[in-house]
Amino acid sequence: MLIEQAAYGNRWRQVCPQAKACFALAGLVAAFVAVSPGAALRVAVLSCMVSCLGAGVPGGLYLRLAAPASGFLALSCLSLSVAVDSDFTWRWAPDALPEMAALAGRSLAALAALLGLVLTTPLTDLIGLLRRLRCPEVLLDLMVLCYRMLFVFSQAVHDTRTAQQARLGDVTTRHGLRSLGRLAAHLAVQVWQRGHALHLAALARNGDGALRFLAPDFAHAGRDTAVAALAGCLLIALARWTV
Amino acid sequence: MHIMEGFLPVEHAIGWSLASLPFVAWGLRSVRRRLREQPEQRMLLGVAAAFSFVLSALKLPSLTGSSSHPTGVGLGALLFGPLAMVPVGFVVLLFQALLLAHGGLSTLGANLFSMAVVGPFVAAGLFRLGRRCGLPLAGCVFIAAALGDLATYLTTSIQLAWAFPDPAGGFIASLAKFGGIFAITQIPLAISEGLLTVLVVNTLARFNPEELKGLALFARRGARV
């Protein structure tokens, strides 16, 4: 997972997650309150520069991660660019251009805020932040177990796909679909097996309740959060009061 | 199809989050009750969430010749039940936003409503209806998975059409636009996912019938699995 690699390898790894979440929230608010598409686009560019130049996230990686969402945006803008009359005939709608521009600006600014958070903060830190925000224990347990197990499953998928491909399991579309079905069925059985094994392991350690973890300490958490809050306010002001 | 971060206007983003909230609370209540009765389910649901996440990242060959990703909505609903799929779906969608940048935080409520509420409930309901009408297992699984998938995309199209009505034709024309554009990719994908889910259930029935009979939706007519 490329996002996790960047989240662990960036310059802001030791900055407390509250500060980064605060700045991302401000970016999201700025995207929604921007007075014009140009202002929203400025917020997007600033958030992108903060991530790439400030935190040291590689630009190529950033663009690669933004591509699928941008594809969705392009497809949706395409559907907004046509109008359908009452007799269901299609025509270009040049009057929809301002709406398309506002939508594209807002979406790109919000996407930049999200990427700024996830590319600089590992998921374990975000789960810790959710625990401090009193997210329900059941959801937190699901998140912790899901995070741990998805790497185990990813490895199982990789190994099984390699074995299937080595036996020409993808030689035709039909073979490919059948191999995929067997892979998913094999993984589904592992859900029960691994769930049972984890339960036994927890029982062996007297674990019969919520999962507990030590939260890492972040130096200068108060200072970092204050700086992020100030930067966030400036970002909102830029979006709200400059055309 | 996940709605990207920031795409919906703020009132729609909040509205869909509020619409999803009762289902999340209902799902959490159901999961808590399940955990009190069967504590071993805590691990199972966590592992199920990871399974759903990994499943949604697999490349599925589509009938149009391209490849896409399965939603896992139908299979998840059949294996774990539609109510458990709400909190599981919440975690999966949150992880997809945080680990893959698919979807987003402001659109989490809207994506949750289409993928973790409408899709699983439609799939489970159709599966039950099919079994009650005496349809063969493979037919029920195909209908549940394919139509559960289509229901998800129809809901997404409705969400988009409601947020961006056509200036001339209004909501209906906008629904035709979004539905028409997404249908090109989603109808073949739904058929592919239906076939894939049949293959998964057939493989489970062949090699692991005991696990399949232990599931609530299959247990009702366990002898015919």
Image (cartoon, coloured by chain):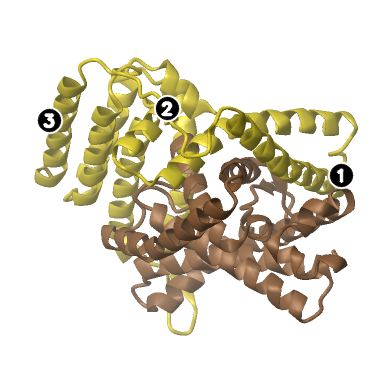
Chain colours: A yellow, B brown
The residue that label 3 is drawn on is A230
For the question of whether residue A81 can be seen, the reply is: no
- Which of discs 1 and 2 lies nearer the camera? The answer is 2
Residue B183 in which image quadrant: bottom right
Q: Is residue B12 left or right of residue A241?
A: right
Q: How far is mark 2 from mark 3, CA to CA? A: 31 Å
Residue shown at the point (32%, 54%) measured from the top left:
A103
For the question of whether residue A197 can be seen, the reply is: yes
Q: Considering the numbered disc 1 on the image, is that residue within a helix, a strand or a loop? A: loop
The answer to whether dots 1 and 3 both sit on one chain is: yes
The residue that label 2 is drawn on is A213
Q: Quadrant of the C terminus of chain B?
A: bottom right
Q: Is residue B137 left or right of residue B108?
A: right
Q: Disc 1, disc 3: CB below 8 Å?
A: no
**In the rendered structure, the residue with mark 2 lies on which chain?**
A
Q: How far is mark 1 from mark 2, CA to CA? A: 47 Å
- Which of discs 2 and 3 lies nearer the camera? The answer is 2
Residue A109 in which image quadrant: top left
N-terminal of the two: label 2 or label 3? 2
Q: Which of the numbered marks, if any, corresponds to residue A172?
A: 1
Q: Residue furthest left?
A: A241
Q: Is residue A27 left or right of residue B165?
A: left
**In the rendered structure, the residue with mark 3 lies on which chain?**
A
Three-letter amino acid code at disc 1? Answer: Thr
